[in-house]
Amino acid sequence: MAIDLKMPALSPTMEEGTLARWLVKEGDEVSSGDIIAEIETDKATMEFETIEEGTIGSLLVAEGSDNVKVGTVIATLIGEDEDATSSSEAGENSGVVDTETPAEVVTISNDIAPPVIVRADDPSVPEGTIMNNMTVRDALRDAMAEEMRKDERVFVMGEEVAEYQGAYKVTQGLLAEFGDKRVIDTPITEYGFAGIGTGAAMGGLKPVIEFMTFNFAMQAIDHVINSAAKTNYMSGGQMRCPIVFRGPNGAASRVGAQHSQNYAPWYASVPGLIVISPYDSADAKGLLKAAIQSEDPVVFLENEMLYGRSFDVPDLADHILPIGKARIVREGNDITIVSYSIGVGLSLEAADMLAEEGIDAEVIDLRTIRPLDKETVLQSLAKTNNLVVAEEGWHICSVGSEIISICMEEGFDNLDSPVTRVTNENVPMPYAANLEKLALINADKIATTCRDILGL
Amino acid sequence: MAKSASPKKNNVKSKKAASSQLIPNRERPDEPERYSADKETLLAFYREMLLIRRFEEKAGQLYGLGLIGGFCHLYIGQEAVVVGLQSAIEPGKDSVITGYRDHGHMLACGIDPNIVMAELTGREAGISRGKGGSMHMFSVEHGFYGGHGIVGAQVSLGAGLAFGHKYKEDGGICLSYFGDGASNQGQVYESFNMAELWKLPVIFVIENNQYAMGTSVNRASSEDQLYKRGDSFRIPGIQVDGMDVLAVRGAAEVAVDWVRSGKGPILLEMKTYRYRGHSMSDPARYRSRDEVQEVRDKSDPIERAKGELLEMGMKEDELKAIDKEIRKIVSDSADFAETSPEPDAKELYTDILVEQY
């Protein structure tokens, strides 16, 4: 039987085209790779090659024919072992691509929706556990050191992490303990070393990649998102990328627009990533350890202004906290303030101010931004019926925007007032001290918004 | 494909281009010699190249039928590069990474054509369960780390795989393939720098097929002798006739020896040519039909190997039988890819993360 040559699809969107010109005639011998026709698509004129060897049997569509549907038989080819007289029976235009592809519309029913996860609470700290007061900086360092002692695959890489002891001293002492094989200074090439780290993770290691700040990670965001976040999915689950990208995020102090930005909303929008942004030392340690142990890529957003602040950390052999679980850091009944990172401290300050006025505010620290613990937020909303999001960052397309959506979609009946965002001003960060102060979120702004909402 | 047992060298020197660039006081790899293959080895290369050619032709045909969607970048014309190089490394020990023109690399890594073709048609049986597509395929089992859609990303990632080999001290090396287009990306040079600083065991392979999509090398590269691109990082470079599988294999041996012995990275510029457009939807108006035809007529890697096999005493009939056998493999893979079911709708939400949080 002869081989049918069908009108090809020559672009991702082509449905029909013009058969501009035949470059062969009936009876011509052709071999693989020979161009037999020119076909005009909506974008260009393309050459149509045969991939079979044989003799052109019949040309079934005339030169210059317009609107030839993809899949139409346009010619037949007689294989070299066959009799040229046994012409094709498939000469009629089918007009339809016979792909045998199921064409039914796929609807997303509940059974394929993402599973609802019941998240574990923080493990309880045993009675009598000693609490060590330590800085966030030291807590982060201890987290890395403990995981490096446990797992040979863990290494730290970044600018000034080794000999300089860390641009912000977060990696202080690691070089001395683990040596330069596992604590590695890089040139100032974020894109390159983010890629090298990601490749090392694909190859079975567990890199901790430090960005001196996340502002510089914009140079490397392609690897964070396109290489690290999407690999497991694109490979059908066979190629993992267990990597932690960490470093300070958000505004520091008087460093201007290019060094002061909160990237939590950027990364939190990407499926395949875990995004963590802790506030205090205990969470910084417990969550960084969890991040390093995780088999998934994690963006771990620290805050320079918090590095030097001290908080209690339980003195446990392995203080590890669940990823994806928010924490109620202050209980209250009148209004909920949802925040993360440095905003948590400001929210607690605001709650203190409100308490003096008899307003009982609940403060939630999201801790993990993706996956977001919406259950904790919605439960609090159900209790207080009023909710404010406090976020050191811009308000447009922010984590606050997401919280508002969640409250609208799933907590609407519990709302006594519109969910409101308190954020930085909608401007690049100015340098002048007075302007910077005006641009940033603070406890006063949070407290004022809470009063406004409650009509007080 | 296993490394051939006894590499016999002959006296035919390959192009001397690189040797004229000798820099004093720096050790340079030996000038590669054209690999002297016995009939059995050359036949294995021939088969492998033919499999890639026929597979890609079939993929082009399935694309034309609407069975393969999106972008589809064919490797036709470049087969000698991957076949020659892969033959010189150790499967199971070394790692391989490339860009989106990846079907040939997967076949040369020994991956079943059926599951590659089924990925192209987006089916459950595809190597990525239909969720990656032509540009995003992986096989950790075969040391094949993709299949990457972002031009140049595989160079940094490949340096990272090499970092892993060195860190784990497993003796492995990484082959990182990229094109002349990618060779202008910034991250390539960031990676060159670190790879040489840290003496990472990586072979950077520039598959110079002359066109970055529609832009010729000369229009895009201030230094169009791409093997020199490692010079300022002290990475030695060798230019190779990428249309000759034995020249490629010869260069691969030098490169593998250099890298495996701990001397750091090496750069191979493979001068090659793609017969088809950049992707299926490229009309290739930036070059003449005559130019393509001339390469096909004079430099085709498969025809060249075929000619040498005939000289070695192979019979036309024997080669014809091989062709038939390969057509069958490819045609079976197409049947498999067409008849396999699409992924279950439940697959939409699987594999986003490894763990549950």
Image (tube, coloured by chain):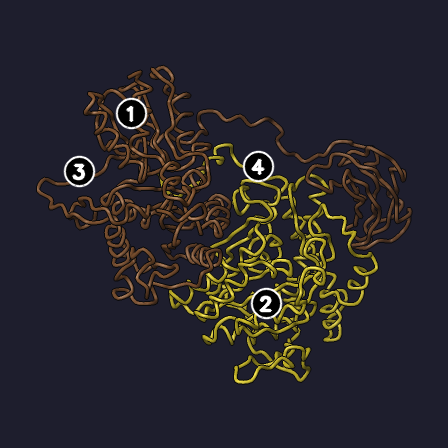
Q: Where is B221 relative to A316, above or below?
A: below
Chain drawn in brown: A
Residue annotated with mark 3:
A124
Residue annotated with mark 4:
B341
The chain identifier of the residue carrying mark 3 reads A
Q: Amino acid at mark 4?
A: Pro
Residue annotated with mark 2:
B85
Seen at 59% across and 73% down, the residue is: B237
Q: CA distance from mark 1 to mark 3?
A: 24 Å
Nearer to us: label 3 or label 4 = 3
The chain identifier of the residue carrying mark 2 reads B
Mark 4 or mark 2: whose residue is earlier in sequence: 2
Q: Are marks 4 and 2 on the same chain?
A: yes
Nearer to us: label 2 or label 1 = 1
Nearer to us: label 1 or label 4 = 1
Q: Where is A165 relative to B228, above or below?
A: above
Residue annotated with mark 1:
A336
